Image: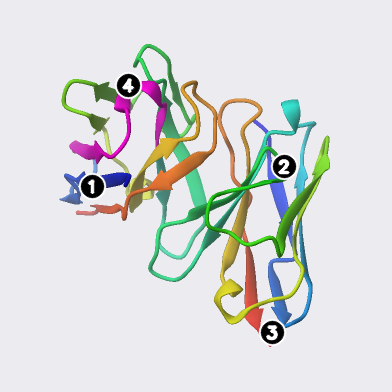
Amino acid sequence: EIVLTQSPGILSLSPGERATLSCRASQSVRGNYVAWYQQKPGQAPRLLIYGTSTRATGFPDRFSGSGSGTDFSLTISRLEPEDFAVYYCQQCGSSPGTFGQGTKVEIK
Amino acid sequence: EVQLLESGGGLVQPGGSLRLSCAASGFTFMKYAMSWVRQAPGKGLEWVSGISGGGTGTFYADSVKGRFTISKDNSKTTLYLQMNSLRAEDTAMYYCAKDLGSGVITPQEFWGQGVRVTVSS
């Protein structure tokens, strides 16, 4: 199975700053089928990005995804207070659809 | 509006069984694949199992293969997860999710609120 490694584990930033989260796969992801999810405490995850760069309904354009092959990233251009959460990447190129271990974006 | 309501969780002894259900509404159930994803306390997400829209294609994580069975009843718009030979490491919040497409291995577009499963003696 494909192993996804997210970095950093914790990202401490202030509102208004730019956040860049990394997701590296142990092998190339077929079709670049990578998704990102946002999870806040006590809530279910929400689909944020799919197909590497397509934003899901309800998320503003300050969120963007990019990458190909084994290296993918999620960028939040200017952090808003509601963006502080845990973010997970997932590969959907082959079964099982494995998740990364998550990056927590916390308020500095 | 998509709604997913899980039920059937609880406390079970090691080696025991549980059957989770997920009642779905707000979309054409038979057109979409569905998944179960779990999250152990304080840990990350683990995709557990998925089933195609028509119900003929099923996939499992290696950690549950041979012990868990996913199924769906399109007439009742309900997803199931039969969990047998439960282990302590199966303790988690189990989320039901509607996938983005009809085939298995697509992102989980909508999630239920989850149902807690605790395996302990």
Label 2: chain?
A
Q: Which residue is mark 4?
A: B30
Instruction: State how far apart marks 4 and 2 are (Cα).
Output: 26 Å
Same-chain status of marks 1 and 3 = no
Look at mark 1 in the image and give the residue it sits on.
B5
To which chain does the residue with label 4 belong? Answer: B
Q: Position of residue B64 (x, y in %)?
A: 40, 32
Residue that extends furthest to the top in the rendered view of this protein: B56
Q: Earlier in the sequence, mark 3 or mark 2?
A: 3
Residue located 19% across and 38% down the image: B18
Q: Which residue is mark 3?
A: A15
Between the residue at mark 3 and the residue at mark 2, the CA separation in whole angstroms equals: 25 Å
Residue located at (54% from left, 38% from top): B107
Q: Quadrant of residue B120?
A: bottom left
Left/right placement of residue B68 relative to residue B18 reads: right
The residue range painted magenta reads B15-35
